[in-house]
Image (tube, rainbow, N blue to C red):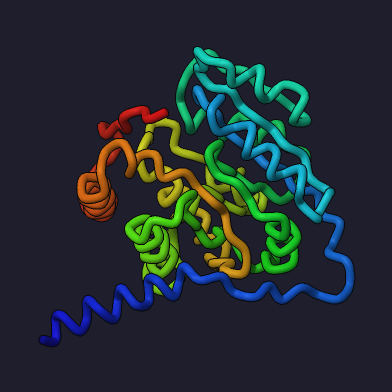
Amino acid sequence: MRNRALVLETLKKAFEAERPLRPRLATQPPPTRLISIIIPAHNEEKYLARTLQALQHQNYSWFEVIVVANGCTDGTERVARGRCQRLIVLSQKSLGVARNLGARMAQGDLLVFLDADTCLEPLALRVIVQRFGKTDAAATIRGRPDCERSAYRLVCGLKNFLHRAVLHSGSSGVIVCWKRHFIASGGFDEGLEVRENSELIRRLKSFGRYKYIGEVAATTSMRRYRQRGFLRMSWLWATLWVLSCFGDLHHRRYETVR
């Protein structure tokens, strides 16, 4: 009975973590800090347009968008062209290489790494600027599924709960950090293809604290769960988490899902 009660309490907290919080916006305008949004995009023509369109509706205007089309064989470059401040084309697929190159080209002192299938709600950048302080080293925002199925809401809610209250690490398709800390940390491990976000955040935390910004959300694609199944993906995430704690993930590869 105690185990059952513990499971139910965890699920309750997961659903509570998925609920939106009310943004506490300052009455004065936000600081005019330039944000560099870096979007790696490997064959993402299906999702990228929506991600870029969501950025056009932000109520914080001082940002640049850098799209890195890494190893694309579809129309990703065509979708990005004219919709971002800088388009970088790479012949290689490596996600780590794409993100590191985008960061080197960034003009802002605040970096936001955004997945190509993830859309920010209109208040997101404004709240990030207000909530991410000088003593913070890394942050993410609340994740939200791109459909209302209870199973997907549970997945996102559980991840939000773990990021906020247990692991104090991880991301929901969004990583926020200072450029100076990113450079000092060495950037993304270009040999990693899985859990590279958490590995970077672990190193960034040596410069300050991890912050979970729950007032705003990022809507992210659940395509892997739709194509591979709920149980299979849940098992995969759990396995990768254990391996990241006790093993080496450099030999692990993600199956491309588009």
Q: Quadrant of the N terminus?
A: bottom left
Is 138 left or right of 153, judged from the image as shown?
A: right
Residue beneath the point at 56% across and 36% down: 116
- In the shown orientation, is residue 126 left or right of residue 164? right
Spot occupied by residue 59 in the image (x, y as percentages of width and height): 80, 55
Furthest-bottom residue in this view: 2
Is 160 located above or below residue 248 in the figure? below
- Whether residue 90 is situated above or below residue 132 in the rendered picture: above
Q: Is residue 15 rendered to the left or right of residue 87?
A: left
Where is residue 87? Give x, y as percent: 70, 24
> Residue 49 versus residue 110: which sits nearer the camera?
49
Q: Which residue is farthest right? A: 28
> What residue lies at 56% left-to-right and 68% top-to-bottom?
214
User: Can you say which quadrant of the picture contains the C terminus?
Assistant: top left
- Residue 158 in the image, given as x and y percentages of width and height: 36, 65
Q: Residue at x 86, y 56 (%)?
A: 32
Q: Tally the numbered discs.
A: 0
Asked if residue 179 shows in the view, the reply is yes
Residue 62 relative to residue 89: left or right: right
Looking at the image, residue 14 lies above or below residue 146: below
Q: Residue at x 67, y 64 (%)?
A: 132
